Image (spheres, rainbow, N blue to C red):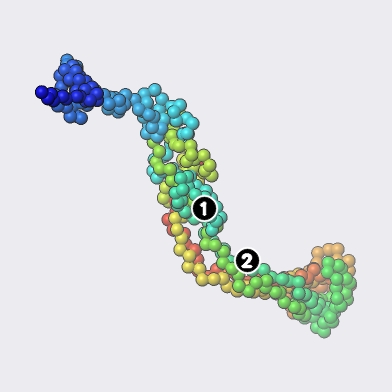
Amino acid sequence: MIYARYVMRPFQSWFVLGWLGFSSLLGCVSDPTCEDLANCAPSGASGTMSSGSGSSSGMPGAEDCTNGADDDGDGQTDCADTDCSSKYTCIPEVPAGFNGIVTIAVTPFGDNAPPCAGGATPTSYYQNPAMDSCDACTCDVSGVQCSPAQLATSFGFDMTCNNPQPVGPIAPNQCQQVFGSSAMVQNAPTVIGSCTANMGSPTMKPPMETTITACSIGMATGGGCDASGTCVASDNVANAEHVCVYRAGHEACPGDWPLALYAFESYVDDRTGCTPCGCTTACEGGTYSIFPNDPTCAGTGIPVEPVGACVMGSGFQTGVSMTALMATCAVTGGAMMGSVTPMNETTFCCY
C-alpha cells in the first residue's frame, strides 16, 4: 500500500500555527489582509495599534525653529529651545509695512557681487547716480606769462591826464616814487603763450557709483526672542555686511532698524558722451595804486582803473605800487551730454 505523505515545511508550520493562535486571541478574520493585520486588536480592547508616529498619536515632534510654536513640548519655543540655539539667532522683529528680511552688501558699481547663502542669485539695486559723470578737464598753465599793464602819469590838474608819460617797470608789491599829479592805465595786461588742455575727449564715468546686492531670507516668524524679536537661521545672517528690511519709496527707518540706505531698482542712461576739454587763458592781479604826496606808500592808495580812466592826485611826489600779476587758465568742456535717470527708489532699513 502506498501512503501519500505531506510534510509541512518549518516556515509554513510556524506561520499557520502563529496565525491561528494570534487570530484566536485577537478575534480577527481567518484569512487576514495587510490592513487586517494593522488594525486588529485583542478582544475587549479599544482603539487601534499605533504605528509609532508622534503626529498620529499626539506625541511631541522635533522642534521647528522658525514657526513660533513649541513643537517638542519642552516649554521652549524656537530660539529659546536648546535644539535651536546653536544654529539659530534672534534679530529685531520685522516692522509693519516692510516686505521681508534681506542681507545686503555695498560694492562699487561694476564689481562682482558676493553670492547669496546657498548659491542663490542676489537682486541688484543702484546708488548715487552719476551727476558729474565725465572725467574732469584740467589745464597746464606752465607755458603762459603775463606782461603788466602800462602805467602813465602826467602833471595836469584837469582830470584828463594830458600828455601822459609812461612809468618804467614797477616790481610787484613794492613802492616806487613817480612824478606827476595824475595817473592812468594805458592798456590791460598782455597774455603771452596759452594754456594746454590735458585731455581732448574725457571719458564717461559709470552711471552709478555703488551697487547694493540683496539676498532674501523671507519673512521669518520664529519666536523665543526677547522684545518680540524674530528667530532666523544663523547661516543666513552670520557673514552679512548688513541685515535689513526693505520697502518701496523713500521712507524713514524705525528704531530697531536705524541705518537707512536708499537705492534704485533700475536706471535709464541716455548719455551720449562728454564735451571736449578746453582752456581760456587770463591774467589776474597787476592792479596799480597811487599815493599822492606819499612817496613811501604808507597810507591808503587810490586804485588806478579801468584802462584809460584818469585818477587825479595832488602834489608831485607820488608813490605807486602794483599787486602781483599771475597767469590763469579757466577750464572748459568735460560736460555730460545726456543724463542718468534713476527709477523706483527703495528704502533699506538695517542694523
Tell me what residue is drawn at x 37 percent, y 34 percent.
Answer: 67
Tell me what residue is drawn at x 46 percent, y 45 percent.
Answer: 118
Q: CB under 8 Å between callouts 2 and 1?
A: no
Q: CA distance from mark 2 to mark 1?
A: 28 Å
Amino acid type indicated by mark 1:
Ala
Whether residue 210 is visible here, answered yes or no, is no
Amino acid type indicated by mark 2:
Ala
Residue for badge 2: 136
Vertical position of residue 48 compared to residue 222: above or below: above
Tell me what residue is drawn at x 46 percent, y 34 percent.
Answer: 88
Vertical position of residue 69 compared to residue 336: above or below: above
Q: Nearer the viewer, residue 203 or 117?
A: 117
Location of residue 212 in the rendering, given as x and y in whole percent from the top left corner? 50, 51
Q: Nearer the viewer, residue 189 or 251?
A: 251
Vertical position of residue 178 compared to residue 95: above or below: below
From this viewpoint, which residue is outermost toward the left? 1
Q: Earlier in the sequence, mark 2 or mark 1?
A: 1
> Along the horizontal axis of the image, is 307 left or right of 32?
right
Whether residue 201 is visible here, answered yes or no, is yes
The N terminus sits in image quarter: top left
From this viewpoint, which residue is outermost toward the top? 44
Q: Local crowd at mark 1 within 10 Å, few (<14), some, or many (≥20)?
A: many
The image quadrant of residue 172 is bottom right
Location of residue 349 in the rendering, given as x and y in whole percent from the top left corner? 48, 44
The image quadrant of residue 65 is top left
Q: Nearer the viewer, mark 2 or mark 1?
A: 1
> Along the horizontal axis of the image, is 53 left or right of 81?
left
Q: Secondary structure at mark 1?
A: loop
Residue for badge 1: 113
